[in-house]
Image (cartoon, coloured by chain):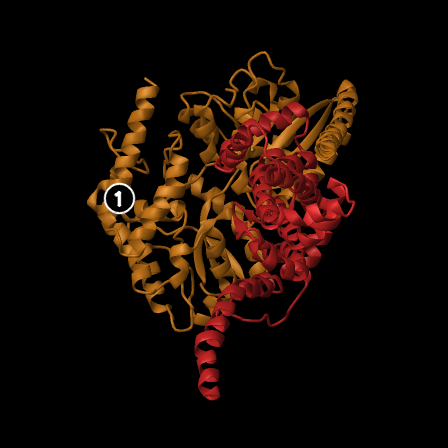
Amino acid sequence: MKRKVAVGNIFYRDIPLVLFLVFTLFPFYWILNTSLKNTTEVFSIPVKYWPAYPTFENYRNLFENMGFNQYFLNSAFVAVLTTVCVTVLALLGGYAMSRYTFKGKGFIYVLLLVTQMLPAVVLMIPLFQTMNTLGLINNLFSLVIICSCTNLPFCLFLMMGYFNSVPRALEEAAQIDGCSMLAAVFRILLPVMRPSIVATGAYAFINAWNVYVYALAFITQKSQYTLPLALNVFQGEYGTEYGLLAAGCVISLVPVLVIFAFIQKHLSGGATAGAVKG
Amino acid sequence: MKAKKITAVLLAVCLAAGAMSGCGKSSSTASQSASKSASRQEINFWYHSADTVTDAYFKDLFVKLNKQQDNYTFSYTSFAFKDFQNKFQIAVTTNTMPDVVSLGFSNIATFVSQNSLLPMNDYVNKISEYKDIDGQIMKNLKDMYNGKIYGIPYAYNQEVAWYNTKLFQEKGIQAPPTTQTEFLNLCKKYADSKNGKYFYSLRGVRPYDSLLAWLFTYTNGAGYKGSWFDENGKCILSKPEFAKALDAYVNLYKSKEVSGNSVNNNYSEVVAEFGSGVSMYIIHNSSSESTHVKNLGEGNFASARVLANDQGHYFASGLQPNVYCLPNHGTNHDYTGALALISYLTNAENEGAMCQTIGRIPCNKEVSSQDWYKKSKNMKLYESYLSDDNYFQIENPYWLSDFSSFITNDMTADFQAVLLGKMTSQACLQKWASAIDKYQQAYLAKNK
């Protein structure tokens, strides 16, 4: 009986999982592989699944000649600041939307929903005009503001769902024990909701890290480029620098992967926390 | 109630902090530029096709230009080729265009139709280098827009054949093919699909230059010397001889005489196949020379004239220069600084250095007296086209504002469909001819 279960596990669990993993991870492996090749090896036939002479030349070039350290810092600046803004505002807004009944709540709810229906390209010109009037063209704060605004509605909905899933009795009990309303939120609710906050923050971070359309519109000076804009430069009119492009992609992936590695435990719990009201 | 107030205050503080810090930086930048502009006028230049080599060249040049004079601060900004069209379109829409912009030949019509570029006829006398620009190139540009000059040409690419001399020697191929018949025989002879080695790399994405050269040469231009239109103004591509020519070309893919990746090969993949030894002969323009040097090493490749037909005639797109344009800021705008910059950029010394660095053919005739030009075998080859009676320039209808998207999108999708057997050559060419006829009619109606 035990043996039958073990064989079943191999066919129904392990093999599909391995196939899925190979399918998912192969592109990442291929990017890494390409980033370690020199130009001629990239397209060599027969295909080389590992470079004959692995080299970090592409990475060295990125940081020494292409200014990738600056682009990395610019992306980090936008992503971190957006994450902080969005998380704090979504936390407060989500709490209000979840716990309070006030005039126009339904209207605000619909209004927030509507903001999610407009594609970025539609908003590009009016937002460019706004940022130009504010003098924020070629200023990374323009991206922080826009990324915060575009991510906030969805994050607010997420937070609202999480708050809905936490029994109101929890904070009421804290208040009975002498906590103020705010202390109850920060001391009692926040620790309980840590996975949800992490999930919201991660969502905002990744969106801001990858922002492209608005960066294209607002940023012209190379010194203010973020990583997605900088990566496009390698796809020139008369050639693509595949090695540099792959190395740039690896560098862009690292923070996202590191964040996921640290928070994935919280993320899987947090992402589903608001799904079912407890 | 208390909590509500605290929440409101927190929200307000967050928003105010964000807004103030953002605006703060900008206002300091604004005041800096204001004090600068008091002494030197700032002239912004946008380059349409950034790459590492060109960027390095222009950055050094602009440092030099700013040191040379005290009237202007010239600033250089470049964009990835993929991003430029959108970026410039935003600038046009929001009236935030630079003072001078570099455009590819195929992009001019799009922005002319939007009235975003200034006709320069009244300004060219302020550019002393104007008289040195090749007359034929200037004529082509003027003819395209009924005598209006929308830009000063500075460099172009010539379609040529590149071949791997080392592999040619190994295989015992004495010389690159000169005719399409010889070429087809070599493709057949050296196709080794088992080992992924071929004679030629075919381009399935944005194939227009190499594909049109093939079609026009094969059909001898159907007797119209490179024009897309017959005596009645109808597009000639729907003629049956073009379908025969396309069949012969597509057959290379269907018979596995080129790589299986050909459908998705763009210029970079074609150049990479050549650079990695997958193929030993490609047709691409002069711009890829620096990549061949990097991939194959100096001396391991050479250039040759493109393929001719059995009559010895050869057709190629050519003389499609990049141009420096003046974005239209209105007739009352002061263009003196912008014209000074164009003058600097197009003088023989600067244009020559640029063409030498990035592998382009100069439009300023004075460059031909420079040492590097005289010593360059490739430049001699490119130049020889212009004086060869067997060469016919394909007169691509760049005056049509839809032509740029036509060659990028429609041509790619349809040619790929023919390669994959989902469309016949005749149907494909009929579709292209109808589209061009439609665009031409609209153009003629607009410019009556």
User: Residue drawn at (70%, 29%), measured in percent from left and top?
Assistant: B74
User: Residue drawn at (54%, 39%), measured in percent from left and top?
Assistant: B83
Residue at numbered disc 1: B429
Residue A210 vertical placement versus B170 (above, below): above
Q: Position of residue B169 (x, y in %)?
A: 47, 68
Give the color of chain A as drawn: red
Q: Nearer the viewer, residue B424 or B258?
A: B424
Sort mark 1 into few (<14), some (14-19) or many (20+) by Cα contacts within 10 Å: many
Give the color of chain B as drawn: orange
Give the quadrant of residue B352. Answer: top right
Q: Position of residue A41 (x, y in %)?
A: 56, 66
Secondary structure of the residue carrying tag 1 is helix
Quadrant, the C terminus of chain B: top left
Report the amino acid beneath label 1: Leu
Q: Nearer the viewer, residue B240 or B379?
A: B240
Left or right of B126? Residue A139 is right
Q: Chain of mark 1?
A: B
Residue B12 vertical placement versus B290 (above, below): above
Whether residue B324 is visible, yes or no, is no
Count how many numbered circles sit on residues in the image: 1
User: Residue drawn at (38%, 41%), measured in percent from left and top?
Assistant: B407
Q: Position of residue A248 (x, y in %)?
A: 63, 54
